[in-house]
Image (cartoon, rainbow, N blue to C red):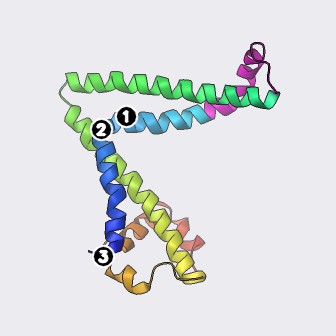
Amino acid sequence: MSIIDIIILVPFAYALYKGIKNGFVGQIAGIGGIVLGIVLGSRFSSLLSTYISQWIDASEAVVKIISFAAIIIAVILLATILSKAIEKLFSLVMLGWLNKLLGVLLAFAATALIIGVIISLISYVNEAWFTIIPKERIEESLLYTPLKEFSEWIFPYFRNLFSI
C-alpha cells in the first residue's frame, strides 16, 4: 500500500462514517434536498422576493438572495423531516440495518466517483503539462488506476476529453 492509497482511503473512511450515520434515506434526502432546493429556489425566488420586499427594506439583489436561500433551507428542512420519518418506518419493520448498508454503498459510490474525477484530472495534467504525481508512485498504488477507470466508465466522455 502506497502513500497515494492511504490518502485515497481517508475520504472512504469518512464515507463509511457518513453512510452509517445518515443511512441511504438520509443520503438521498441530503442530495435530493440540495438539488431540489436549488431548482425550486431558482424558479420561485422572484415570486417570494415580491412578498419579502414588503417586510425588508433592502436592495432587490439582497432580497432575491434571501428568497433563494430561504427556499433552499426550507426544502432541505422538509427533506430532512421526511427522511427521519422514513427512517423510523425502516426501524419499525426492522430494516434499519439495510438502510445503513445501502447508505454506506451510496456514500462509497459517490466518494469513488469524486476521487475518480480528481484522479482523471491529475492524470491529464500529468500527461499534458507537468508532473503532479510521479509515474512510479501511480504504479505503486493499488487504488489509483481502478478509481480512474471507474470514473471513465461512469463518464465515458472523460476518456475523450482528457485524451492527448
In what element is the residue under mark 1? helix
> Which residue is located at x 50 percent, y 76 percent?
123
Closest to the observer: 32 or 68?
68
Picture quarter with the N terminus: bottom left
Q: Of all residues shown, which one is farthest toward the bottom?
A: 136
Q: CA distance from mark 3 to mark 2?
A: 29 Å
Q: Could you classify mark 3 by the number of other residues whose Cα lies within 10 Å: few (under 14), some (14-19), or many (20 or more)?
A: some
| Residue type pointed to by label 3 | Ser
Q: CA distance from mark 3 to mark 1?
A: 33 Å
In what element is the residue under mark 2? helix
Answer with the quarter of the image where residue 12 lies: bottom left
Q: Which residues are magenta?
A: 39-59
User: Label 1 belongs to which residue?
Assistant: 26
For marks 3 and 2 on the same chain, the one whose residue lies earlier in the sequence: 3
Closest to the observer: 4 or 112?
4
| Residue type pointed to by label 2 | Lys
Quick check: marks 3 and 1 in contact, CB under 8 Å? no
Q: Of all residues shown, which one is farthest toward the top?
A: 55
Locate residue 65, reporting x and y percent. Answer: 71, 31
Q: Is residue 7 left or right of residue 54?
A: left
Picture quarter with the C terminus: bottom right
44 falls in the magenta region: yes
User: Label 2 belongs to which residue?
Assistant: 21
User: Label 3 belongs to which residue?
Assistant: 2
In what element is the residue under mark 3? loop
> Which residue is located at x 68 percent, y 33 percent?
42
Quick check: marks 2 and 1 in contact, CB under 8 Å? yes
**Above or below: residue 148 compared with residue 44:** below
| Residue type pointed to by label 1 | Gly
For marks 2 and 1 on the same chain, the one whose residue lies earlier in the sequence: 2
